[in-house]
């Protein structure tokens, strides 16, 4: 075949060999804003190292391999003995090892730990999102275990370790461990109070035997799990180790792995407990209250992870448009494409700024910030995770047919995008949680209004939106039917207030015009052309060394 028929022109170079953290101006500015000066140099150095790794060809290849070779369930060995193990491709272990060594399970005990970890999680998610599941649950298990000081003393140093050790053995012989969680059952789903798994107390203090089935159990090769089961005193929280203190395997029967839309590198399983040894965490009958802090922390990771997926999708779209010529010039200079890219960039920036503000609230750990989180966290979980799928889908379209091909990486992002909206409570669960907070915790609404009040008077569209929100809150009759509408307003007002305070004027102006002022359409690319869209796009463009 003649070589001239295979001349390659006008193809975009891969977005590889760049610092994912440093070239994300929104994220780096957030870290500088929320990390105290004495800690900032160390934080920037560690995030820079992680950012360069995430943008490397090696990490990108690990992500491809981990998804091309999904986990495989081994229920029995060659002799017929139950082993209940899951085999992962070596790339999975390399991704996890790099993440753990970067401190992505260590936030609770170091200065600015949540902001540093959230920024790292957002960066490393862009290399591969599936392995974020065990990272998130390991990090989130800490506050639940702290309800029992003895358990916390035993497990917390291993959970927050910067050493990843694969394989199942006595945790006391390992330098670090990972945790999972099992709450949902097939008959109840999100309604965990309908769980039927039984917990029968043993003579040893705090020891129980569990019998039942868990419909979803993520990362089943973890060293331990927090699960809910019905004890004599009611629904309670338990720690289930995979390996018992005497070194033998606990009864943890993996029935099958879920065949999922995305998140394919990560194993999600159905498991059976049949006389499975467990330790009580917290008090009998207070299982939801005990595990809720773990759920809250993983909900924050849903927000952060979605922000990471958005950022990667937008970065790929802007990068492609900067190098791809069409209709006489680079796509990025075409007014209509510029409008689409700017609109996507607004959504990505708003998600990142909100995610990092929530992480900063965790670090502050004051009564006011805890009250703010109680309302802002389910609001953000509802909104940001839902916007993720729309953003990734539109960004994929910016690459045209190239974006629909697996080699571009965009299909993997699109399959991953809906997950965070479902994980740890779908949209209706979050909306109902917001209503419960409004009804039971007036301090949370006060804290939220103080937060958005910091920006009042700076933009007339934001001021009008705050007034409209207050009007909506004045009439809560029949509110459940319009809960999503109310939560959406909460989210947009909060994002608008944060951008007015901290984003460049052209970004805040565009967001307030389109999201709060009604000067935007139902699809991306409908921003008013009078805005400074070129600056918005330039701010979102990743640079390659």
Image: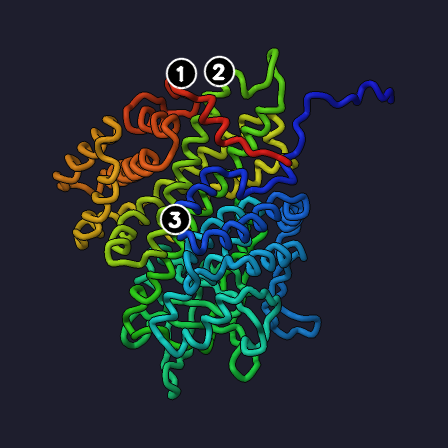
| Residue 479 appears in view | yes
Q: Residue furthest bottom?
A: 203
Q: Secondary structure at mark 2?
A: helix
Identify the residue position indicated by label 1 in the image: 529
- Image coordinates of residue 104 in percent, x first then y, are 50, 57
Could you tell me how far apart the alpha carbons at marks 3 and 1 are, in whole angstroms? 33 Å
Residue pictured at 61% horizontal, 54% vertical: 95
Dot 3: few (<14), some (14–19), or many (≥20) neighbours within 10 Å?
some
Residue at image mark 3: 34
**Is disc 2 in contact with disc 1, using a CB cutoff of under 8 Å?**
yes
Q: Residue 335 bears which disc, if any?
A: 2
Residue 353 percent coordinates (x, y): 39, 41
At horizontal 58% and vertical 42% (from top left) the residue drawn is 19
For marks 3 and 1, the one nearer the N-term is 3
Q: Identify the residue at image location x=61%, y=68%.
A: 167
Nearer to the camera, 446 or 258:
446
Q: Badge 2 local density, few (<14 within 10 Å), some, or many (20+)?
A: some
**Residue 275 in view in this figure:** no
Q: Quadrant of the C terminus?
A: top right
- In depth, the one of 306 and 460 nearer the eye is 460
Q: Which tag, 2 or 3, sits closer to the chain's start?
A: 3
């Amino acid at each position: 075949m003649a070589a001239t028929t295979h001349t390659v022109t006008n193809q975009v170079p891969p977005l590889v060999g760049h610092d994912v953290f440093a070239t994300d101006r929104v994220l780096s500015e957030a870290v500088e804003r929320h990390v105290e000066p004495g800690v900032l140099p160390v934080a920037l150095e560690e995030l820079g190292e992680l950012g360069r790794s995430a943008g490397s060809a090696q990490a990108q290849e690990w992500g491809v391999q981990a998804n091309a070779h999904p986990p495989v369930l081994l229920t029995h060995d060659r002799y017929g003995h139950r082993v209940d193990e899951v085999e992962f491709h070596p790339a999975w272990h390399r991704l996890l090892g790099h993440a753990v060594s970067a401190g992505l399970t260590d936030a609770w005990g170091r200065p600015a730990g949540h902001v540093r970890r959230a920024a790292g999680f957002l960066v490393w998610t862009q290399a591969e999102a599936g392995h974020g599941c065990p990272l998130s649950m390991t990090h989130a298990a800490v506050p639940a275990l702290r309800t029992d000081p003895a358990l916390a003393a035993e497990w917390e140093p291993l959970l927050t370790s910067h050493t990843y050790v694969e394989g199942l053995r006595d945790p006391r012989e390992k330098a670090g461990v990972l945790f999972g969680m099992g709450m949902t059952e097939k008959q109840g789903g999100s309604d965990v109070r309908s769980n039927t798994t039984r917990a029968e107390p043993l003579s040893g203090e705090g020891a129980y035997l569990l019998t039942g089935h868990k419909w979803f159990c993520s990362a089943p090769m973890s060293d331990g799990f927090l699960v809910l089961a019905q004890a004599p005193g009611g629904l309670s929280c338990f720690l289930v180790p995979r390996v018992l203190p005497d070194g033998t395997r606990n009864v943890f029967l993996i029935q099958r792995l879920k065949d999922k839309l995305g998140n394919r590198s990560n194993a999600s399983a159905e498991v059976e407990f049949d006389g499975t040894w467990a330790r009580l965490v917290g008090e009998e009958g207070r299982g939801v209250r005990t595990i809720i802090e773990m759920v809250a922390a993983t909900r924050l990771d849903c927000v952060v992870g979605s922000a990471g997926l958005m950022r990667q999708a937008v970065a790929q779209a802007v990068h492609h448009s900067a190098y791809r010529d069409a209709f006489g010039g680079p796509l990025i200079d075409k007014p209509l494409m510029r409008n689409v890219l700017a609109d996507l960039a607004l959504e990505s920036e708003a998600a990142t700024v909100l995610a990092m503000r929530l992480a900063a609230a965790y670090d502050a750990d004051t009564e006011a910030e805890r009250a703010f989180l109680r309302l802002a966290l389910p609001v953000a979980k509802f909104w940001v995770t839902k916007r993720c799928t729309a953003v990734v889908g539109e960004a994929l379209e910016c690459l045209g047919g190239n974006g629909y091909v697996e080699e571009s990486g965009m299909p993997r992002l699109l399959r991953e995008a809906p997950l965070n909206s479902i994980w740890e409570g779908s949209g209706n669960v979050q909306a109902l949680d917001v209503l419960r907070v409004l009804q039971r915790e007036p301090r949370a609404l006060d804290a939220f209004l103080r937060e958005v009040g910091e920006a009042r008077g700076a933009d007339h569209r934001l001021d009008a939106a705050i007034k409209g929100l207050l009007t909506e809150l004045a009439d809560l009759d029949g509110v459940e039917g319009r809960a999503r509408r109310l939560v959406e307003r909460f989210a947009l007002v909060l994002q608008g207030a944060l951008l007015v305070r901290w984003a460049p004027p052209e970004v805040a102006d565009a967001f307030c015009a389109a999201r709060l002022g009604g000067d935007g359409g139902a699809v991306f690319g409908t921003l008013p052309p009078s805005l400074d869209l070129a600056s918005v796009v330039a701010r979102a463009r990743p640079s390659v060394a």
